[in-house]
Image (cartoon, helix red, strand yellow):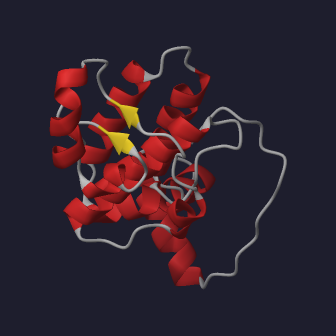
Amino acid sequence: MGTSPKTEQLQIRVSAQEKTAIQRSAARAGMDMSSYVLSRVLSVAAAQYRSCVAACVGAQHASYALAELSSLLSSLTAGELQDAVETPPPAGATAFLANYIAAMVEYACARRAIAVPAWTRAIAPLSEPVFGTALQSLRLYLLTHSPPPFRSRNIFVDATLGAQV
């Protein structure tokens, strides 16, 4: 589930039958028991989401990383999405990126009819509006056609989750 070194241990109590079932399932998956249990507990979608968010924060120009995050969020099932978006953007994210990511997550959750994670409410909307284009003639259109999660965060875009220009 990642390349970080294993420095901690977790013990759980299971019955003999449960242990045998886990061993069989791990063998069928071609994994050792620890890797198998971790793969079942720690969502792959969550790891992909965290990776995409980190790429957004670390990018000099975040547009490509945001497009990658958009693709990921639009491809997840409701269950995968709910598991994936438990973690807020890191503290190093700019106010714009934190709001954009939060808006994308809110939009994705609305599309999948699942609860929005609580961390999105903790991100204050931008104080100044940000438009998806520098063209003045399109601003009225963006003001009226931006999806509600983006509009409420003072971000005005046309293409949203799953739609790329």
Residue 132 versus residue 126 in the image, above or below = above
State the residue in front, 73 or 99: 99
Question: Residue at (66%, 43%) from the top-left corner?
Answer: 90
Question: Residue at (29%, 55%) from the top-left corner?
Answer: 108
As drawn, which residue projects farthest toward the right?
7
Q: How many marks?
A: 0
State the residue in front, 14 or 37: 37
In the figure, is residue 26 to the left or right of 94? left
Q: Residue 124 placed where, x, y %?
A: 57, 56
Q: Residue 139 placed where, x, y %?
A: 23, 32
Residue 21 versus residue 125 in the image, above or below = below
In the figure, is residue 164 to the left or right of 82? left
As drawn, which residue projects farthest toward the bottom?
15
Q: Quadrant of the C terminus?
A: top left
Q: Residue 119 placed where, x, y %?
A: 57, 63
Q: Quadrant of residue 109?
A: bottom left
Q: Is residue 158 visible?
A: no
Question: Residue at (56%, 14%) from the top-left corner?
Answer: 60
In the figure, is residue 33 to the left or right of 62? right
Q: Residue 156 placed where, x, y %?
A: 31, 39
Q: Quadrant of residue 142?
A: top left
Q: Quadrant of the N terminus?
A: top right
In the figure, is residue 67 to the left or right of 158? right
Q: Is residue 92 visible?
A: yes
Question: Residue at (41%, 48%) from the top-left corner?
Answer: 45
